[in-house]
Amino acid sequence: KKRMDHQRKILTTNEDAAKRLQRRDNNDVPHPIHDCVIQETYFRFYQRMLIPKLYRLASEGCWEEVIQRVRSHPREAKFVNAYPPNDTAMHRVLRVNLDGCFKNEVEDRNREELLDTARDLRSQVFLSLVKANPDIVMVLDVRNQTPLHLACQNCCPNETSITHHLFIMYPEATAIQDIHGNTPLHLLVVHPDTPVSLITLLIRYTSPSTLAHSFNV
């Protein structure tokens, strides 16, 4: 009898605790400031601890170090940022418009030498990232842009080899419109010196419905 009374007391205590917990859950409303603090804390933790060094190097433009890092840590090429701009190391590398660099800083002859060196280095970075993670060419960032979009925007007309390579690896990207409705072709034709052969190639694979869309920024 004592054992039964003891068990009944335990059950009653557990039921009361469960009811109190349920009442607390029903009455407590999450405070928005509390939620913001939690999100901010996790964001800082994510930025500091979960973003790989390869992505950081690509973001900082340390392209020579990117090549070395890919060789030693190829898995880091699979990283996609969970926060905007939701991109990859490849996006970071291709987002740089080299033609706009070094202006008013050096003489024209020296500037061209620097640009040629930077273009060659970017090509090496591109090939190393693709080798480590071929699927990287299919990743969409927060602007709904693939690496092909960025290559058409920033690597032409002087780095068409990168654009050709991306097209061969993922031709389906030609049909993808970014948040402004632009396909890679829209971003390509704004460059007056782009080879006609490359434009023609993209036209063949771009949907006629998107061809009628006007360029937007």
Image (cartoon, rainbow, N blue to C red):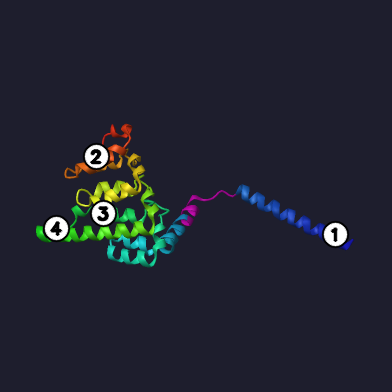
Report which residue position mark 1 lands on: 5
Q: Label 3's element?
A: loop
Q: Please name the amino acid that badge 1 sits on.
A: Asp
Q: Nearer the viewer, residue 45 or 41?
A: 45
Q: Is residue 56 above or below residue 214?
A: below
Which of label 2 and label 1 is nearer to you? Answer: 2
Q: Residue at x 46, y 59 (%)?
A: 41
Report which residue position mark 3 lands on: 96
Q: Residue at x 29, y 43 (%)?
A: 184
Which of label 3 and label 1 is nearer to you? Answer: 3
Q: Is residue 186 above or below residue 3?
A: above
Which of label 3 and label 2 is nearer to you? Answer: 2
Report which residue position mark 2 lands on: 200
Report which residue position mark 4 lands on: 112
- In whole angstroms, how far apart are the C-alphas of marks 3 and 1? 75 Å
- In whole angstroms, how far apart are the C-alphas of marks 4 and 2? 28 Å
Q: Label 4's element?
A: helix
Residue 102 place in picture, x, y as percent: 17, 58
Q: Nearer the viewer, residue 196 or 185?
A: 196
Q: Quadrant of residue 64?
A: bottom left
Residue 156 place in picture, x, y as percent: 22, 48
Q: Quadrant of residue 50?
A: bottom left
Can you say which quadrant of the picture contains the C terminus?
Answer: top left
Q: Quick check: 16 left or right of 215?
A: right
Q: Please name the amino acid that badge 2 sits on.
A: Thr
Which of label 3 and label 4 is nearer to you? Answer: 4
Disc on the earlier residue, 1 or 4: 1
Residue range in magenta is 28-38
